[in-house]
Image: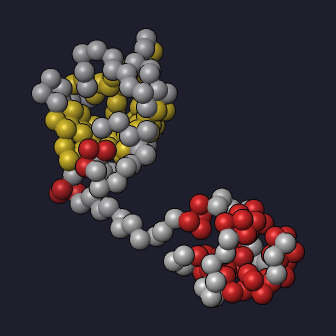
Amino acid sequence: MFLLGRRIREIRHKRKMTLNELAAKTDVTASYISQVEREIIEPSLSSLRKIAVALGVPLFTFLHTDTVDPVVVRANERRKLDLPESKIVYEFVTPMVSDQKVEPKMEIIYFTLEPKSWTSEENITHEADECVFVIEGELKVYLEDTDYHLKAGDSIYIKENIGHRFYNPTDKVVKGITNITPAIY
């Protein structure tokens, strides 16, 4: 298993645990653990499970590979969603589910909303939690029948399936970021 032994050793050292201490907690010998750490032998699944429990980490910590390349989204290459009936522009900071490069668990979206404009005529709902952070300007957030006035640096957390829409009450463009989880776009 690629780098399995190195991972075990790194975690053991972080826990300031000796080979003998780990062996005592796992009912395997210190010599066996040493051979695993040096990639001389591969541990059985049973032994690996005992090592994971003794180190206080989930078993998958040792089973996943770090060979997945990070997905970089360049500012000038962001996917944009410009809704014709709205004055809001969304730029996807994270990859979209439809990109199929990764399966994101969340979405971070940079948005701009023109002055004196709504995001939509009606409240929208979706099956995802959303956190909106205002970077610049002011934003009125309407949740069902209640509205909240946000200024730069403010944020609001919106639970899934809560009807909401945004309004820019000023004469300047508002800029912000929204984080949506799970990813829905």
Q: Specify the quadrant of the image occupied by residue 75.
A: bottom left
Q: Is residue 135 visible?
A: no
Marks counted in the figure total 0
Residue 100, position as x, y percentages in the image: 28, 50
At 29% from the left and 24% from the top, the residue drawn is 167
Toward the top, the furthest residue is: 145
Q: Please indicate whether residue 135 sits to the left or right of residue 15 in the image.
A: left
Which is nearer the eye, 150 or 47? 47
If the image is split into quadrants, where does the C terminus sit? top left
At 75% from the left and 73% from the top, the residue drawn is 15
Q: Is residue 102 above or below residue 27?
A: above
Which is nearer the eye, 58 or 154? 58
Q: Is residue 53 visible?
A: yes
Residue 40, position as x, y percentages in the image: 62, 88
Which is nearer the eye, 10 or 38? 38
If the image is split into quadrants, where does the N terminus sit? bottom right
